[in-house]
Image (cartoon, grey):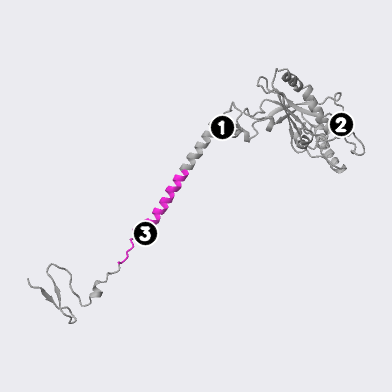
Amino acid sequence: MEPLEISPPGGEPPGILQQGTQKPTFANEKTALMPRAPTSRSDPLEAAIKPCRFVALSVVLLAIFAITGALMWGLFWLLFLVDGGTESSSDELPCYIKDPNITSATYTSRLLRVNLSMSRYPKAVCNDGSAGTYYIKRAIPNLGRDHIWNIHFQGGYWCTDASQCQRRRNATAYHWKKIYREESPLLEPQKTWYSTTSKLWARSLQIGGVFAPPRCSPLYGVNQIFVPFCSSDAWLGELDPSNQTFGMHFQGLTIWRAVLQEVLQRRGLQAAIDAFRGGRGKKPLLLVGGYSAGARTTMIHV
């Protein structure tokens, strides 16, 4: 078959359309072959769904994080209550962390008051001349720790001139007046660290800390002694009343020595020493400490 000649407009030479092809020849070939820019058509439904997808994805992720956090927190408390609430039979330190009661005031211990004998220790007195005092709880029987004594001296600063000492006297007199009028019960000594007398103090003392450790503590069940502060001298004085002492006794060191003598002779320390030397008991252990003025006297005298 003969090729057909097509004459395009504009008087250009005729192009030839070969048989079996679809491509015509145009007068402006360059323009005809340039690709057309695609036209962008935004779908309204797609535009509305797109932000919803983002919100839905965010909600799903937040839900996953919340559920994961809740599961981990629940697992933590389950382990804490099941494992931490049990008392360990060993003396390992982790039991302090596992025991939930250790961060609260659940553990307390009651110590009983003992006045120092005025006949044995005539100068072991408070500022006003009242007898020095200590509180004690004996070791738990059959626990194997009756050879240990923990002695703690209370702090409370000290007075260095007449005005400071008088303020301590006035504060003590204020509480004593209320007790005398039966407007207040006797006080536990840790609430009256400034006291110049032992007359304010109750017959027993409820206290925590090192005096009431958990079973896993090496201090559990030992002999516990708390010595309240009433000499206003940082446990350092050995002075009788005079004009230089503003008419006050300053016998803190005398009280300190008297308490240790009591522990040695009347609270079992000497007997434990003799038993150990005779091969009949454990080696005695005496722990002496305190806070504030009580810590200072420990560093000086021990």
Front position in the image: 297 or 98: 297
Closer to the eye: label 3 or 2: 2
The residue stretch that appears in magenta: 38-66
Q: Give the mark nearer the N terminus: 3 vs 1.
A: 3
Residue 59 in the image, given as x and y percentages of width and height: 43, 49
> Can the viewer see residue 54?
yes
Tag 1 near tag 2, CB within 8 Å: no
Which residue is at the far right? 243
Q: Quarter of the image for the N terminus: give it.
A: bottom left
| Three-letter residue code for mark 3 | Ala
Residue 241 magenta-drawn? no
Front position in the image: 22 or 175: 22
The quadrant where residue 99 appears: top right
Front position in the image: 68 or 182: 68
| Three-letter residue code for mark 2 | Gly
Q: Give the mark nearer the N terminus: 3 vs 2.
A: 3
Closer to the eye: label 3 or 1: 1
> Can the viewer see residue 192?
no
Mark 3 burial class by Cα count in 10 Å: few <14, some 14-19, many 20+: few
Reading the image, the residue beneath label 1 is 84
**Residue at 91% of width from left, 39% of height from top?**
244
Element type at mark 2: loop
Vertical position of residue 133 compared to residue 68: above or below: above
Residue 50 in the image, given as x and y percentages of width and height: 38, 56
- Measured Cα–Cα span from mark 3 to mark 1: 56 Å
Reading the image, the residue beneath label 2 is 129
Tag 3 near tag 2, CB within 8 Å: no
Reading the image, the residue beneath label 3 is 47
Residue 63 magenta-drawn? yes
Left or right placement of residue 167 versus residue 222 in this view? right
